[in-house]
Amino acid sequence: MRRLTETHHAHNEADMRQNALLFLLILLVATAGCEPAETEPAQVWFIQPTEGDTVEGPHVDVILGASGVEITSADIHEPGTGHHHIFVNTDLTPLEDTIPDGVPGILHLGRGQTEFEVRDLEPGQNRFIAVIADWNHIPLDPPAVDTVHFTVVAPEDPSDEEDPQG
């Protein structure tokens, strides 16, 4: 009886090994020629203002869009995440360098904001450059950058309007 049980047990182990090998073979054949999914490169764009807009100032609402990256607060240290920076009438710093903090004209949206009010813009031509950077404030590679040019006009003074009564 013991010999029969040992033989039966040996056959079960052999069957399990054979089934596992068959499963691996099927998996290999099914995935042959499949390439790993490529991740979409990060992109950023201005939803507001848009290129060529004329906006009433001196405060301008900015709305940013992004894809291929999760916009998070700057304290999230995970691949595939980043946060926005806005260069206000200021040229970009080198893309391989850390975006400096405390520099006039460079706004860090480190709380994960996608909307922001830029205050005290001068009337006339203005330029914003949006850059997504990682938790170290280093722009993503490849860079996710967008630029928008727009005109700020002074708000209309209600006292300048003619009195409709006369």
Image (cartoon, rainbow, N blue to C red):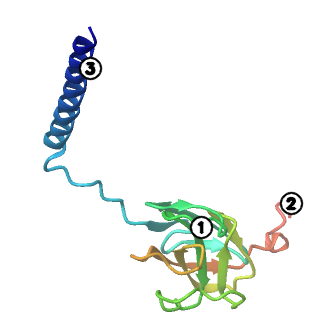
- Looking at the image, which residue is at 82% across and 69% down? 158
Horizontal placement of 141 versus 136: left or right? left
Residue for badge 1: 77
Q: Is residue 123 above or below residue 18?
A: below
Q: Residue 43 appears at what percent x and percent y?
A: 43, 67
- Looking at the image, which residue is at 29% across and 54% down? 37
Q: Are marks 2 and 3 in contact (CB under 8 Å)?
A: no
Q: Nearer the viewer, residue 158 or 142?
A: 142
Marking on residue 68: none
Number of residues whose C-alpha sits closer than 10 Å to that of mark 3, classed few (under 14), some (14–19) or many (20 or more)? few
> Which image quadrant for residue 1?
top left
Tag 2: residue type?
Answer: Gln
Q: Earlier in the sequence, mark 2 or mark 3?
A: 3
Q: Residue 143 appears at what percent x and percent y?
A: 43, 77
Residue for badge 2: 165
Residue farthest to the top, as pictured? 1
Image quadrant containing the C terminus:
bottom right
Q: Are marks 1 and 3 in contact (CB under 8 Å)?
A: no
Tag 3: residue type?
Answer: His
Q: Residue 19 appears at what percent x and percent y?
A: 20, 28
Residue farthest to the front, as pictured? 2
Number of residues whose C-alpha sits closer than 10 Å to that of mark 1, classed few (under 14), some (14–19) or many (20 or more)? few
Q: CA distance from mark 1 to mark 2?
A: 63 Å
Find numbered disc 2 in the image and state the secondary structure of the residue it sits on. loop
Q: CA distance from mark 1 to mark 3?
A: 51 Å
Q: CA distance from mark 2 to mark 3?
A: 105 Å
Residue for badge 3: 9
Count the marks: how many?
A: 3
Q: Earlier in the sequence, mark 1 or mark 3?
A: 3
